[in-house]
Image: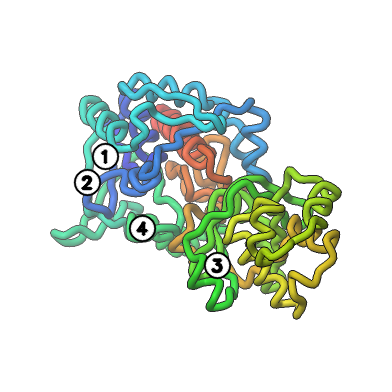
Amino acid sequence: MKHTAVIGAGPAGLMAAEVLAQGGADVTIYDAMPSAGRKFLMAGRGGLNLTHSEPLPDFLARYREAMPHLKAAVEAFPPDTLRDWSEALGQPTFVGSSGRVFPKAFKASPLLRAWLRRLDAAGVKFALRHRWLGWDETGELLFATPDGPRVVNADATVLALGGASWPRLGSDGVWTAILVAKGIAIAPMRPANSGFTVAWSDIFRDRFEGQPLKGVALTIGAHQIRGEAVITRTGIEGGAIYALSAELRDAVLAKETATLRVALRPDLAAADLTARLSASRGKQSFSNFLRKAAQLSPVSIGLLQEAAVTTGRSLASLPAADLAELINAVPIQITGVAPIARAISTAGGIAFDELDDHLMLRHLPGVFAAGEMLDWEAPTGGYLLQASFATGVAAGKGALKWLKS
């Protein structure tokens, strides 16, 4: 029986191992961590968002420039198939109000435990605390283990080592140097679905750290998203920020700063908002007037005050029309990108030109790659896990074909 090494025990690696075992291969999964699926468990900490229910053409468009390269893998293992797979593991799914798909248990741990039991029943072996070091001069795999160096001969290898976010969970990006030394082109690793830094005033930071901006519309250039953001001590993050992170990141990296505009009341027309702000304030404080007239939260009013300070103008001195315009286009100066180690995911990785249609590295026959190692990114919402599962399936099938040839 042909031996296959899968390096990386995240969703892509586990899925590749399952496909290989079902195809009759002898499979061992190697991972540097003491247990499997650590980042997968972290992803499910607030509710495991497996995939999304939107129509497949819209779904595929979420992968932006990488869509043509991921299309075949996702079409071969689409969201409905992933849901069926989860149900077969005793974890039925449901569609939330946002269209996102979750297991009914809402957690990653029951799904992972059932999955590991099925892999064990299929004969898949695990070699944990095995850190991959590359290949020796004869082409055998090298690992560092608690018992010293280990050399492994594999008839096929699937690399599923993740990106470079959350390195304490195993995705540290160290593998990039190993592949670059083999002549493989790697797009630089960059944070994706990350927070951003803002030079808040001490007063604003101390008062509003951790406060959410709800029901806002965020705009950078021609891109706009509705959702929620959260003020942090060093800047801003949250679902709507993550959805714009690629545009924000690229703007900051190109010009060292970017202007994010926030519509605090996006559902109110300018004329309606102006009319409300033209009413008499009476003896109310200006903040209380804004709270009642425009239904603004304290953090929204604080954000307006931050913007006013930078222009040297008092909010109370602004004409109603100007104030209405500011409320729905509050500028936030983004000064930097949060560290990649804190990002939800990463952009960059193995260039698709280095891979054939079966995700085999052209310069390393018999070596396949899957998951976040590849040069793609996607917003949160189930797209990250779906592509990781789907490319794991594709790499597993590719390795089976290679073994049979």
Q: Tell me if label 3 and label 2 are in contact, CB under 8 Å.
A: no
Q: Compare marks 1 and 2 and give the one earlier in the sequence.
A: 1
| 53 vs 238: above or below | above
Q: Tell me if label 4 and label 3 are in contact, CB under 8 Å.
A: no
Q: Compare marks 3 and 1 and give the one earlier in the sequence.
A: 1
Q: Tell me if label 1 and label 2 are in contact, CB under 8 Å.
A: yes
Q: Dot 2, how many residues are within 10 Å of its Cα: few (below 14), some (14-19), or many (20+)? A: some
| 266 vs 16: above or below | below
Three-letter code for the amino acid on which mark 4 is drawn: Gly
Q: Where does residue 90 sit, x and y in percent of width and height? A: 31, 21
Residue placed at 51% from the left, 70% from the top?
A: 234
Q: Secondary structure at mark 4?
A: strand
Residue for badge 3:
235
Label placed on residue 134: 4
Residue for badge 2:
127
Q: Nearer the viewer, residue 46 or 181?
A: 46
Residue placed at 34% from the left, 24% from the top?
A: 91
Residue placed at 59% from the left, 71% from the top?
A: 198
Separation of residues labelled 4 and 3 (CA atoms): 39 Å
Give the quarter of the image for residue 172.
bottom left
Q: Dot 4, how many residues are within 10 Å of its Cα: few (below 14), some (14-19), or many (20+)? A: some
Residue for badge 1:
28
Label placed on residue 182: none
Q: Compare marks 4 and 1 and give the one earlier in the sequence.
A: 1
Q: Secondary structure at mark 3?
A: strand
Q: Where does residue 363 sit, x and y in percent of width and height? A: 52, 50
Q: Tell me if label 2 and label 4 are in contact, CB under 8 Å.
A: no
Residue 253: in sight, yes or no? no
The colour style of the image is rainbow
